[in-house]
């Protein structure tokens, strides 16, 4: 068992796709760095914190992107975002069987906020174009930095979301909420609270992710293979279904996850944090 959370971006790719099949575009040797960080006296990365390229998964051609959480928390800047947009645009041209995004990001880099925000909006548009063309987009979330901010929105634009039980997905990170609204609104130091409101188990139970796996690269690989044919065309009916889910969520006025789990039919919901993934699946609530 290889921990997905403890792997770097390229280690995840090497273990996830077919052995030796990953061909990287714009690798570190190209030295494509952010034009903004040096002006602020900040270190740059020769890949700007993301690896993109082509590979095979179970013998099928896929385009892949993996964010490096060890560089600025996987934050999106101008070059980082442009590489993602380019990947999706090439997918429209070459039509792979799927696009895989190994997301690990705290959102947009504050150091280049305007450029990063524009980049994220372009990523979302390019992703939806790929979905509209019938090419499934699969997002995998299990890194230590979670998937927050603009990348949290990008993830929810995809066809299929796979999370580990220690993965996290949300619009705003716990520290951001606490800084904006105070510790009474969200205590970022309460790790149990953080995971039962943004963690993989909660997201799976509430329908925000499609597959829940252990913190194991092999588990993510199996789930990604299973999702290869899970394209969900962007149609009016699909959008209405999503809106219905959001309306149901808004109708729930509870402030805690445990009562929400109870409303979803989870027996003994207070025990959910102690359950492993197999036991959670065994409840049969989804």
Image (spheres, helix red, strand yellow):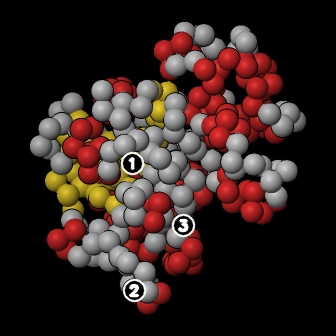
Relative to 52, 164 lies left or right = right
Rounded to the nearest angstrom, the CA distance separating label 3 from label 2 is 17 Å
The residue lying at 57 percent from left, 78 percent from top is 114
The residue lying at 45 percent from left, 66 percent from top is 72
Rounded to the nearest angstrom, the CA distance separating label 2 from label 1 is 27 Å
- The residue that mark 3 highlights is 108
Q: State yes or no: discs 3 and 1 in contact (Cβ < 8 Å).
A: no
Mark 2: give few (<14), some (14-19) or many (20+) Cα within 10 Å: few
The label nearer to you, 3 versus 2, is 2
Check residue 38 in the rendering and tell me which mark sits there, or answer none. Answer: 2
Q: Position of residue 166 (x, y in %)?
A: 52, 35
Q: Position of residue 24 (x, y in %)?
A: 20, 58
Instruction: Look at the numbered disc 2 and give the secondary structure of its residue.
Output: helix
The label nearer to you, 2 versus 1, is 2
Task: Indicate the quadrant where residue 199 lies.
Answer: top right
Above or below, 9 against 249 in this view is: below
Above or below, 98 against 209 in this view is: below
Q: Is residue 255 visible?
A: yes
Above or below, 151 against 158 in this view is: below
Q: Position of residue 178 (x, y in %)?
A: 75, 57
Which comes before the other along the chain, label 2 or label 1?
2
Check residue 101 in the rendering and tell me which mark sits there, or answer none. Answer: 1
Relative to 212, 23 lies left or right = left
């Amino acid at each position: 068992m290889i921990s997905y959370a403890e792997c770097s971006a390229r280690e995840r790719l090497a273990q996830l796709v077919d052995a030796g099949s990953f061909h990287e575009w714009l690798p570190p040797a190209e030295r494509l760095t952010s034009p903004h960080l040096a002006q602020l006296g900040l270190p740059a990365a020769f890949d700007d914190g993301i690896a993109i390229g082509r590979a095979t998964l179970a013998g099928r051609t896929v385009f892949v992107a993996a964010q490096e959480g060890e560089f600025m928390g996987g934050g999106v800047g101008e070059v980082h975002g442009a590489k993602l947009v380019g990947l999706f645009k090439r997918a429209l041209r070459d039509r792979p069987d799927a696009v895989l995004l190994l997301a690990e990001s705290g959102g947009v880099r504050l150091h280049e906020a305007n450029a990063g925000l524009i980049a994220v909006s372009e990523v979302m548009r390019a992703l939806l174009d790929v979905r509209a063309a019938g090419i499934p987009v699969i997002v995998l979330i299990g890194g230590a930095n979670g998937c927050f901010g603009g990348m949290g929105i990008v993830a929810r634009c995809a066809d299929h979301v796979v999370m580990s039980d220690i993965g996290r997905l949300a619009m705003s990170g716990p520290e951001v909420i606490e800084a904006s609204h105070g510790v009474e609104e969200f205590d970022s130091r309460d790790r149990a609270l953080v995971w039962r409101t943004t963690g993989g188990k909660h997201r799976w139970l509430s329908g925000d992710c499609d597959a829940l796996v252990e913190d194991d690269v092999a588990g993510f690989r199996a789930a990604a293979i299973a999702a290869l044919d899970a394209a969900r065309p962007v149609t009016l009916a699909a959008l209405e279904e999503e809106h219905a889910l959001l309306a149901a969520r808004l109708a729930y006025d509870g402030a805690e996850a445990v009562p929400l789990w109870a409303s979803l039919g989870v027996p003994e919901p207070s025990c959910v944090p102690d359950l492993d993934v197999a036991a959670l699946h065994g409840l049969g609530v989804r």
